[in-house]
Image (cartoon, helix red, strand yellow):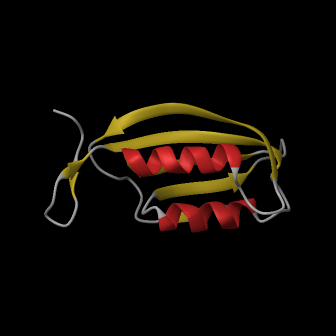
Amino acid sequence: MAAARRIGGGIAKELISVDFEVFGRVQGVFFRKYTKKKATELNLVGWVKNTDMNTVVGQVQGEKSNISTMKQWLKHTGSKRSHIDRCEFKNENKITSLTFASFDIVK
């Protein structure tokens, strides 16, 4: 049976977890702040942080349809001052429950 969570007593939704890394001008342009805002709007949980390689990495978990929206946002939109060269996604898996309570910026 597919991983699912009941939302408001309604239809069960498939839960997904995926890791991401965003390349380009993504540090010093409020990318993490906007990523948290977008993830929260989509009811996703996880984390985001800067790397020493001038990329941004993180993990998002939530409903499959919302993860798909977030992936498009990470690939094409980002923060207003960012310039995304590419975004890589790894370890996309079905999950049975969320392992985070919120979406956080990690220092």
| Percent coordinates x, y for residue 90 in the rendering | 56, 31
Which quarter of the rendering shows the N terminus?
A: top left
| Percent coordinates x, y for residue 98 in the rendering | 35, 53
Between 26 and 85, which is closer to the camera in this rendering?
85
Which quarter of the rendering shows the C terminus?
A: bottom right
Among the 4 quarters of the image, the one containing residue 43: bottom left
Residue at x 84%, y 46% (from the top left corner): 54
- Number of numbered markers: 0
Determine whether 50 is above or below 43 in the image.
Answer: above
Between 90 and 11, which is closer to the camera in this rendering?
11
Residue at x 45%, y 58% (from the top left corner): 44
Q: Is residue 100 left or right of residue 36?
A: left
Q: Is residue 63 left or right of residue 3?
A: right
| Percent coordinates x, y for residue 94 in the rendering | 34, 36
Between 104 and 94, which is closer to the camera in this rendering?
94
Residue at x 78%, y 63% (from the top left corner): 80
| Percent coordinates x, y for residue 17 in the rendering | 43, 42
